[in-house]
Image: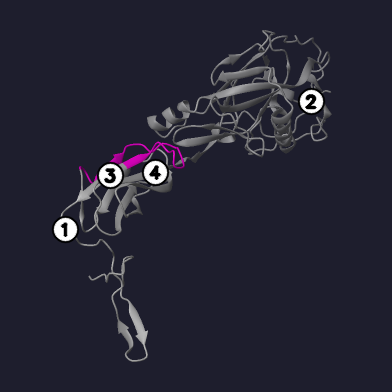
Amino acid sequence: MRMKKKTKAGKMLTLVIAAALAAGILSTAAYAAIDEVSLTVKAAENFEDEAAKADFEGAKPVVDLYLVASSEKDAMYDTYNMTLLAPYADKDDIKITDDMDNDDWLALADAAALTAKTDGTPIVKGKALGTKMDAAEDGTKLAPGLYLAIIHGEADTDYWEEAGTTIATGEVNTYHFSPLLIHLPTKLDENGDGVIKTSVEDGSWIPDASMEINGDWAADTEVVVKYTHTQNYGDLLIKKHIENFEGTQATFVFKVRYMEKGADEETERVATIHMTKSGTNEELVVKLPAGAKITVIEDYDGARFKPVGSDTVIIESLKATQGWETENIAEFENEPNGHNVDGYGIENHFEYSEENGWSHAYKKDPAGKEVHP
């Protein structure tokens, strides 16, 4: 099938296909066919700082490459004719026609990704971003065709999202990538540098509808992809240990302070642990921003207990681990201070009787003893 291209000026694209399949021009001279092609996928390096760059690199994004359609040089026109391959050729939502616009290609990329997720087998697997891919896993050189590039984290085993997008998980952020559909070889843009960017925000090679791409076919193609990211979260486990516990229940209060990214002021959360006997009790503080510096302060140590060691624990960078097995742990220890005073908060309490009506009364502790301020 000989492909034509329609473009819509100003649209952000997440696939690279239109330029490679520019409208065929009747040839008065033979165009040399390209037999071997290559693809290098890189990420846009618009990092806020070195920490952001390190987190992205720590996610270890890699590329899997799927062959969606074979492609053959047209003898008369400056274009390539494509034939869908299994399992993509068997899907009702994967069709290639002569009048596809950018939205159609976007939909095709999503459909191809979902098919690759369930039925596809990559011909190139786990190549780090920036690696030149010119041969399949079996050593066969890459030939002209329509390829699907899927980017995901090297260590992520469940990297597919519902819409066919994929993730790479860093310590602080999770990075989200759209499926990349690209024809190899690709038409060079006017600057002829062979570098394609997947967003008009980055100076797109996608032309205005009134323009034509008249460059040569490039056997070696480099694509710079954009991505989005979301904040990761982790949990904090506070442990309280007391030896030689004395008296009735004691309540211990902890302030958990951290700075949200982009915030001007600290956020503070409060956790409490109740103790009735010697040993260790725990409390889990959930959904704190990964990468944040966490300061945990024992604010109230009970009226008859004192801290053993520091009353403050600092976690320089919270890890994105969750649940009671989290790696983020703040441990505190107390011991009796010799004052036999119950550690309860006091609130006004009133009781009613027919003889006296409503009157103030002290609340009682679990043992039945009045609790006085």
Magenta span contains residue 253: no
Q: Quickly name the residue at label 2.
A: 87
| Three-letter residue code for mark 4 | Leu
In the rendered structure, which segment of residues is drawn in magenta?
309-330
Q: Residue furthest left?
A: 338
- Position of the N terminus, as image quadrant, is top right
Image location (x, y in percent) of residue 226: 56, 32
Identify the mark nearer the N-term, 3 or 1: 3
**Residue named by callout 1:** 339
Which of marks 2 and 4 precedes in the sequence?
2
What separation in Å lies between label 1 and label 4 (alpha carbons)?
A: 31 Å
69 or 23: which is nearer to us? 69
Sequence order check, earlier mark of 3 and 4:
4
Is the C terminus in the top left, top right, bottom left or bottom right quadrant?
Answer: bottom left
Q: Does the rendering let one see residue 212?
A: no
The residue beneath circle 3 is 332
How many residues crowd around disc 3 within 10 Å: few (fewer than 14), some, or many (20 or more)?
many
First reached walking from the N terminus: tag 3 or tag 2: 2
- Identify the secondary structure beneath mark 2: loop
Label located before the other in sequence (1 or 4): 4
Question: As drawn, which residue projects farthest toward the bottom?
Answer: 355
Tag 2: amino acid: Pro
62 left or right of 82 in image: left
Q: Is residue 88 in sight in this rendering?
A: yes
Looking at the rendered structure, the secondary structure element under dot 1 is: loop
